[in-house]
Structure formats: C-alpha cells, structure tokens
Image: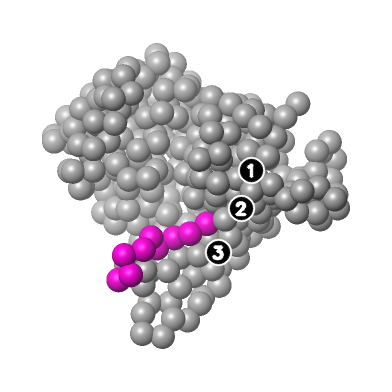
Amino acid sequence: MKDLAIFNAKTTTERLPFDSLVRALEEGFATGCQLPERHHHRVERPGEPDATLLLMPAWSLAEDPQQYLGVKIVTVYPGNTARNLPGLFSTYILYDAATGEQLAIMDGNVITGRRTVATSALAGRMLARPESSKLLVLGAGRIGSLVPYAYRAVLPIDEVAIWSPVPEEARLLVDRLRGDGIAANVVDDLATAVHEADVVSAATLATEPVIKGKWIKPGTHVDLIGAFTPAMRESDDETVRKASIYVDTMEALHEPGDIVQPLRDGVISKDSIQGSLADLARKTVNARTSDSEITLFKAVGSGLADLIAARMVYAGSGPRN
C-alpha cells in the first residue's frame, strides 16, 4: 500500500505553476474523463442559513494509461460570516482508480482557484488576439488576484488594470502586482478601461452587468469567471449578442446568468454557442477568425479541471508523460 500524501496550501500552490497547468488542462480537456453530475446536499443549521455540502467526482477513462479518481468536497456555510470565518472550505481527495486506494489529500481551495484562472487563460490563449497586451481585471478577490499571473503565462500582457467594487482591494492588488514587477493601475473610469483593453476578465459576484457591450472595441476577448448562478450576471445583452461565445462545458447553458438569461429572453440561441473548451482543445471548432471579432468565454467550473490539477500536484510540477 502507498503512503497517503498530504499537500497543504503552500505545496499545492507550488506544484501548480500556471504555464504547466495550462498545458495540462489543454491535454486533459482534449482527452476528457468520466464526469458525473455534481452532488448538492442541504445541511440544516438551526438559527442560521442552511449550509451546503457539494461533491464533485471525476475519474479517468477506462483506456487511459494512468488511472485516477478524485472527489472535491466543498462545504458552504453562510452563517460563518457571524463567526468571522470563511464561508467556504474545500478538500480534494485523489485515489488510484484501478484499485480504489487513497493516494493524496490536498488543499481544495488552491486547486479550485488555480484551475479556474488557468482554464480562463487557456481559453484566452486560443481566443484572444495573439498580440494582446492590455488586460483589465474586474474583481480583486481570491480569484481575481490570480488572473494577471495566469494570463501573463499565455499572452504578452504588459499592462494590467484593476477594477473592484471594493476600491481598497483593487489598491492592494495593484501594489502586489507592482511589487512583482508588473505594470498595474487602479481603474476609476470602467467604460474607458473596457474600451482600451485587449482582454477583459471579470471575477465578481455581480448580479447586474458590470460590462457593457457598447464599451467593447472590435477584437476584444471577454472572459467571464464569476456570476455562477442564474440570478448573477457580469455582462449585458449587447455583449453576448455581438460576441462569438464559447464555454468551458455545456453546463454553462444551464447555470450562469450570463448565458441563461439571454437564452431565456431570446437574445441568443443555443446555436450562438460556438463550442466548448474540449472542442477548442480538439480543434473540432474554429477559434478566432479575424482581428476584429469579439470573443467571449464563460466558465462554470469542471470536475475534469480539478482532476487534472490534482494529478499534477500528486505527480510533481508538470504533466506526467
């Protein structure tokens, strides 16, 4: 029997450098895996909002040379706000899919954060203009703060603008980026910043659009990371109407408001979705076709991406051959 490996947040982070993770995700989305529906369970909490237990399983295809099975376990406790605790905790457990033997336990928050922005960066590498150098990030929280680093691993980004509904968070992130030698500034005029950007990446909890289609210039790539429920939205109707739309998985047609609401209202149709990240990785659909095309990528998260990242943590600092 193998010893159970335990990877804390620091080690999990160190084993997921963005350049290697993006390559691993491209290979993994092209190959695919067994991906059951995620499981949601309500946990009653007397005197406070109900909590949620979320289980996200995935495992290797039977023909894969390396056999892994993984489950991400997420607890969401809204009542933790009153306890001055985070509302979400996450753990990833990796198994040998051939035997069912436990291999490793690792920090699920790190897995989620880094695979999320690396997935967007992979899509950006395929959909943004190759010379894109100006990145605008909306949101400066845990996910937004990683976006510049992921995009700089795939595109020649040399200017980063940060906007946040919490200005102090934007200032802190800009200071951190400058400390790492990255030219960065805080955005006050969002309309102008969107118009000037080559890539607009939103990682917010917005329930009303923060990106207006009238601001977006031809050739822009729009990356929507936040707004993960039907009631949440980061982009307006004009944005999705004028863009070529791609998604990480087809679950994006059912979960996020940026797709669900325009579909419901007839602004777009299912035929407006050009393809998934798997389609792009397999090159079965066209990516950007001109320098003037506006592309849009909407991600909802996938157990496949979790499994790819977890395999990478277990194996070392890059994809296993």
Disc 1 + disc 2, Cβ < 8 Å: yes
Under circle 1, the secondary element is helix
Kindly identify the residue that appears in the image at 49 percent across and 50 percent down: 109
Residue range highlighted in magenta = 82-90
For the image, the number of numbered tags is 3
Label 2, residues with CA under 10 Å away: few <14, some 14-19, many ≥20: many
Q: CA distance from mark 2 to mark 3?
A: 12 Å
> Does 262 sit above or below residue 180?
below
First of labels 3, 1 by sequence position: 3
> Does 75 sit above or below residue 31?
below
First of labels 1, 2 by sequence position: 2
Q: CA distance from mark 3 to mark 1?
A: 17 Å
Give the residue type at disc 3: Leu
Instruction: Based on the picture, tell me whether residue 89 belongs to the magenta stretch.
Output: yes
Q: Position of residue 110 (x, y in %)?
A: 50, 45
Snapshot quadrant of residue 141: top left
Label 3, residues with CA under 10 Å away: few <14, some 14-19, many ≥20: some
Under circle 2, the secondary element is strand
Q: Which residue is mark 2?
A: 92
Disc 3 + disc 1, Cβ < 8 Å: no
Give the residue type at disc 2: Tyr
Instruction: Based on the picture, tell me whether residue 299 belongs to the magenta stretch.
Output: no
Whether residue 315 sits left or right of residue 245 in the image: it is right
Under circle 3, the secondary element is strand
Q: Which residue is mark 3?
A: 54
Q: Which residue is mark 1?
A: 310
Kindly identify the residue that appears in the image at 35 percent across and 40 percent down: 144
